[in-house]
Image: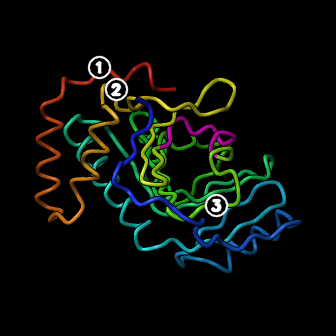
Amino acid sequence: MTAITRSDAPRRTSPPTPGVLFEGTSWDDYEAMLRIVGDRPIRVTYDRGSMELMAPLWKHGGVSYLLGRIIDVLTEEWDIPVEAADPVTFKREDLAKGVEPDKCYYFGDHAAQVRGKDRLTMGVDPPPDLVIEADITASSLDRLGIYAALGIREVWRFADQSLQFLHLQGDRSFQARATSLHFPGLPLALIFQALVQAEGSDKTAWVRSFRADVRALPPPPPRDHLEG
């Protein structure tokens, strides 16, 4: 199973209100908008002349927060070096693409390469190994296509009460998988179950319960094949 959806989740009768989309914008326009937005909680996405501004919803932050706590537990229990950022802008002028994921992570050698840096340059520094996309509000742009073009190898995507582990393929497309790329042996079902259990739960007790579930899993294999 490569996607899990709650059977009791309410179905959308109409799409959520999208962000504001500007067509025919230049790279300079995009850079100027990033400066205007600054540190405010507004996400700016750019793809070859199209620029979208979107303000995340409260629930949007809730899902990304929970998945972030899950990754914290996984890296601690499996002793995986990690560097994280939230929020951050990843952009490449040569590709005319820019995006701001909900959360992003570097693991292993890549974590060591970016540790201590205040600013990253895509095309020079490595792209993040994993990003989280909590698509509570639908985007008008192909954000997965932007992630693929930037070389991001794994996306955890939550949309329409459904969770997917997406792995980057050689043809720059994403394919859904039942286990995580960067946490080998981690089943999609366990993470989805944890998200369901988090609803209405004290988050400290919830993290403690999830940590026990992780400790019950077989030890992950060496990560050497993931580096590079």
- Image coordinates of residue 98 in percent, x first then y, are 69, 56
- What distance separates the C-alpha of mark 1 from that of mark 2? 7 Å
Q: Which mark is residue 221?
A: 1
Q: Is residue 124 above or below residue 141?
A: above
- Image coordinates of residue 125 in percent, x first then y, are 59, 43
Q: Magenta stretch: residue 48 in it?
A: no
Left or right: 79, with 156 as reference point:
left
SS for callout 2: loop
Q: Earlier in the sequence, mark 1 or mark 2?
A: 2
Q: What type is the residue that disc 3 sits on?
A: Ser
Q: Which residues are magenta?
A: 147-155
SS for callout 3: loop
Q: Which mark is residue 138?
A: none
- The colour scheme is rainbow
**Counting other residues with Cα less than 10 Å from the Cα at mark 2, is it few (<14), some (14-19), or many (20 or more)?**
some
Q: Which mark is residue 184?
A: 2
Mark 1 or mark 2, whichever is nearer to me = 2
Circles 1 and 2, Cβ within 8 Å, touching? The answer is yes
Q: Which mark is residue 139?
A: 3
Q: Residue at x 46, y 26 (%)?
A: 227
- What distance separates the C-alpha of mark 3 from that of mark 1? 36 Å
Nearer to the camera, 69 or 36: 69
